[in-house]
Amino acid sequence: MSTTILSFQNRVVIETLHNEGRSLRYIANYLGFSQTTIFNELHRLNSEYQAELAQTDLERKASQRG
């Protein structure tokens, strides 16, 4: 199983399209990722999705891995 790493720019696009009411399928096709990747990203936080918070969460978790 491979891991998809999204860039901050990808996260901004996800946030924008999600706020426009676009579907997971649309966002996934637009960015070239699977719908599962987009679903998991949108559910990374326990609140409304924000690209900046998601990026900070990723960086925090990565630094804890050592």
Image: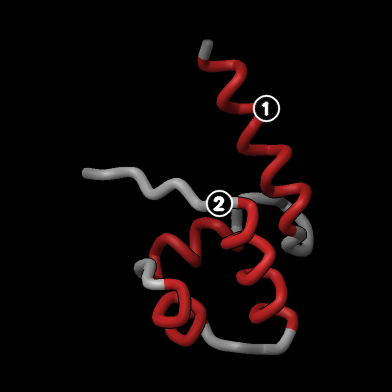
Q: Quadrant of the N terminus?
A: top left
Residue 53 percent coordinates (x, y):
77, 48
Q: Nearer the viewer, residue 14 or 49?
A: 14
Could you tell me which residue is drawn at 64 percent across and 52 percent down?
8
Q: Is residue 31 above or below residue 54?
A: below
Q: How many marks?
A: 2
Q: Which residue is mark 1?
A: 60
Q: Residue at x 63, y 59 (%)?
A: 9
Q: Position of residue 16 (x, y in %)?
A: 71, 76
| Snapshot quadrant of residue 49 | bottom right
Q: Residue at x 34, y 44 (%)?
A: 3
Mark 2 belongs to which amino acid?
Ser
Residue 23, x across and y down, in percent: 53, 86
Residue nearest the viewer, comparing 19 with 9: 9
Element type where label 1 sits in the image: helix
Query: Which residue is at the far left?
Result: 1
- Does 2 appear above or below 12? above
Quick check: 32 left or right of 52?
left
Give the residue type that dot 1 points to: Arg
Q: Which residue is mark 2?
A: 7
Q: Is residue 20 depicted above or below 16 in this figure?
A: below
Determine whether label 1 and label 2 are within 8 Å by CB: no
